[in-house]
Image (tube, helix red, strand yellow):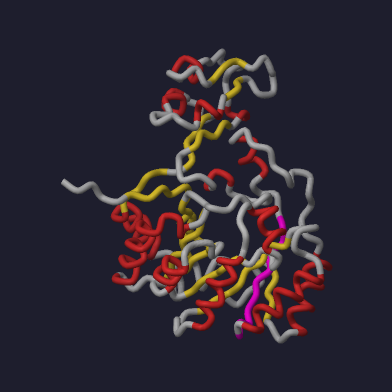
Amino acid sequence: MVEERKGLVFDIQGYSVHDGPGCRSLVFLSGCPLSCDWCANPEGQELKQRVLYRVSKCKYHERNCRRCISACPYEAIAESGDAEQPVNIDRNICRDCKTYECTKACIYEALNLSGKWMTVDELMAVIERDRKFWGDGGGVTFTGGEPLLQKDFLLEALKRCKASFIHTSIETSGFASTETFMEVINLLDFAFVDLKHMDPDKHMEHTGVRNELILSNIKTLAASDWPGLLVIRIPVIEGFNDSDENIRATAEFLKGCDLEIVNILPFHRLGDSKYKQLGMKYKYSESEGTPEDVLLHIQEIFLKYDIACFIGSNTPF
């Protein structure tokens, strides 16, 4: 008997109005080839489930609970002696775990797993359940992580959506083989593709990969006969990609591709607590949100190139 293909989904959110046309459901697929310093979803960076530890729910002191320590067969969890964080998790040991006994033993939901392995049938059941709440013009947006990393699962889900006349969209870094990129794109009605920096070395320094493949994929898509709507998204990160030089280089690249819509996203620290739950350091933990005057200045530069530039969620799509 052939086992059904499964994908690792780390979240499904309904009622989104900022990630494609209308009211939408967002499907977050785990795994990403990039490692952006500012990533807001660190729990979705790896194509594996990970243990999140919410100290605020831990009853180590209040109930004298030691259930997770006793449950772990690899002795990866130990008392810390720190009142603010009662237990330490050795992530080097924990990452090789397959059973996650600690999360099963924790009755206070202090320990949880990121993500759930789902079949396409299971995913479609959730999408169809949410469909009645979309109203006119809604649909589903696949995001991540990087959804292209789970290509086979994504393609099967997209084909099922198409068969059910569901509007489909994606949020992607564009970092995949051109064959994979275009195969997925051709099943979509709408696409957000990130363009984080024009300089390949700077891109490498802050995301872990160079940008030549991403730029090439954007060019290929722009030159194709794909009938959908492409919006280039730029997360604005202070000191990384917010210089006039980079913004102008980006605008010139987009004009050369005959692309005319950009969505710039202000930086936020909404992922800060997730880094703590994963025992990871967050490089931007002290950074503030992007000032409005910086966003307006960037918008002004794009407008001078006759490129429509929408800030944050203030979009017509």
Q: Is residue 315 above or below residue 81?
A: below
Q: Based on the picture, tell me whether residue 142 belongs to the magenta stretch.
A: no
Q: Is residue 268 left or right of residue 55?
A: right
Left or right of 36, for residue 151: left
Location of residue 298 with respect to 305 vertically, above or below: above
The quadrant of the image that shows the C terminus is: bottom right
Is residue 62 or residue 87 the one in the foreground? 87
Name the residue located 51 percent from the left edge and 77 percent from the top edge: 220
Q: Position of residue 37 (x, y in %)?
A: 68, 49
Which residue in the rendered view is the most extreme toward the right?
293
Predominant secondary structure in magenta? strand
Foreground residue, 274 or 280? 280
Q: Specify whether 26 is left or right of 59.
A: left
| Whether residue 49 is situated above or below residue 306 in the rendered picture | above
**Residue 297 coordinates in the image, percent (x, y):** 82, 73
* Residue in view at x 48 percent, y 59 percent: 26
Q: Nearer the viewer, residue 97 or 176?
A: 176
Residue 262 drawn in magenta:
yes
Out of 127 and 27, give the one closest to the viewer. 27
What range of the chain is rendered magenta? 258-267
Residue at the spot x=56%, y=77% of the render?
A: 219
Q: Position of residue 156 (x, y in %)?
A: 32, 62
So how many labels did they put on this image? Answer: 0
- The residue drawn where x is 50% and y is 59% is 143
Quarter of the image where one finds residue 128: bottom left
**Where is residue 244 drawn, in percent x and y?**
81, 71
- Residue extending farthest left: 1
